[in-house]
Amino acid sequence: MEQIKTFLDESEIPRQWYNVMADLPTPMKPPLHPGTGQPIKPEDMAAIFPMNIIEQEASTQRWIDIPEEVLQKYLLWRPSPLYRARNFEKLLGCPVKIYYKNEGVSPAGSHKPNAAIPMAYYNKVAGTKRITTETGAGQWGSALSMACQMFGLPCRVYMVRISYDQKPYRRMMMNTWGAECLASPTNLTQVGRNVLAEHPDSPGSLGIAISEAIEDAVTTPNTKYALGSVLNHVLLYQSIIGLEAKKQMDKLGIYPDIVMGCCGGGSNFAGLALPYVADLFTGKKVKIVGAEPTSCPTMTKGPFAYDFGDLAKSTPLLPMYTLGHDYIPAPIHAGGLRYHGMAPIISHLVRESFIEPRAYDQMKTFEAGIKWARSEGFIPAPETNHVIAAVVDEAMRAKEEGKEKVILFNWSGHGLVDLSAYDAYLSGKLQAYELPDEEIEKALLAIKDFPKP
């Protein structure tokens, strides 16, 4: 069969991460200090991150060595398998070959450990004694909980309340790995107390949870914060996905026409896409598509602007597509995609037309996910269903054009602890939802006086 399943082939695991910052044809706008309006300096972030991670965040070095201690942990599941979705192809009946990188084979069930393990390692080396973080659907929180346990670090996770309620098994995974998981907003931080005073029944948001985790980190001795997406160093660590995929597809003698992923903060999409974006810079032809929800259409309806990454405005001002830092997304089941902003690197590449963004409503995504499960067997996470819906669109377009195409996408995680979402869809309780323009305009009032990129 034409597939690669090489858990034992360590030669496919890259020994370096790829940093796209070294190859951008046009420079990115710098993050700004919210007080001075000047480009952020490394020391400005020292209260939040250890210096070894800050150095990677600012790095323009093309290749960064993966520490041996991190590689040894990666070997628990990497290289992740590359599969061809023959049954899904047959179901669609279109002239496409569909390949997917199965990141659901990690112990946490998603791509998130690719970044969680190096973050825990670098914090341990730097002398950090405790880590705080946020999580939406729980994939990042569970991955960091596992990674912190591996390196002997206590971990506290602020989980968006609606996901905390919808996905109790994610919380149980965190607890099993020794972490503390709290429903955000909480009464433990000033940010949380302020939100609850105004909105006692707040469903929470990633922006709120990030603010709580940062406040906890900067007010507790020997504690640092770890972010699961958005920032440059997170995308750097995830590049192992695309680098592996390239090696595996080279073995087949195949190069994709289209590379795709779902987009929340941007890390899983970037992990697969950025090594192929590098090929675009050298003139190679490949279409790169990012799929986001219509309920949180950051790239497709938000402006490119300077904005905070969190509600409490405790991060630098980031140049990104955004819906406004105090926007509270609708409580759709794809909790990992409910983020008001987008990674600055991805935002820059969208603005420069290297990446094409698309938005899908949750009904269409679950329809695609059900078709996938009933043909390929694997049950995708609700987030992953967004890219599967985009794959269906591309397959239909290939049929209309009468051209055979090779599609590669990132199957970012399984949905085995998201079955309540499938139950809601199958029982007719889910509805299509598109964020109204007037709500976007209202949310964007929060950034109307910010510096313009």
Image: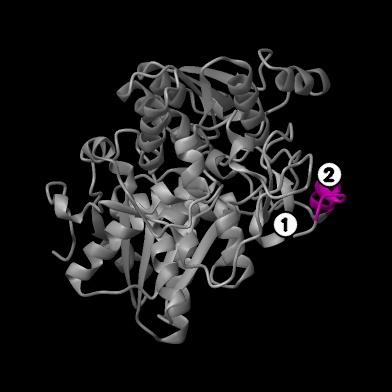
Residue at which label 2 appears: 446
**Relative to 427, is 112 on the left or the right?**
left
Mark nearer the viewer, 1 or 2: 2
Residue plotted at (58% across, 30% down): 48
Q: What percent of the width, then of the height, locates residue 401? A: 46, 85
Nearer to us in this view, 156 or 398: 156
Per the rendered image, the range of residues in magenta is 438-451
Q: What percent of the width, then of the height, locates residue 452? A: 79, 58
**Relative to 188, is 236 on the left or the right?**
left
- Quick one: label 1 or label 2, which is nearer the N terminus? 1
| Helix, strand or loop for disc 1 | loop
Residue plotted at (35% across, 49% down): 373
Disc sitting over residue 317 in the figure:
none
Q: Is residue 222 magenta?
A: no
Q: What percent of the width, then of the height, locates residue 74? A: 26, 40
Q: Amino acid at mark 2?
A: Ala
Q: Is residue 445 magenta?
A: yes
Q: Residue 225 is drawn in which quadrant?
A: top right
- Spatial separation of the CA atoms under disc 1 and disc 2: 13 Å
**Relative to 270, is 250 on the left or the right?**
left
| Helix, strand or loop for disc 2 | helix
Asked whether the viewer can see residue 6, the reply is: no
- Quadrant that contains the C terminus: bottom right
Nearer to us in this view, 33 or 289: 33
Disc sitting over residue 302 in the figure:
1
Q: Residue 251 is drawn in which quadrant?
A: bottom left
Nearer to us in this view, 221 or 366: 221
Residue plotted at (68% across, 28% down): 203
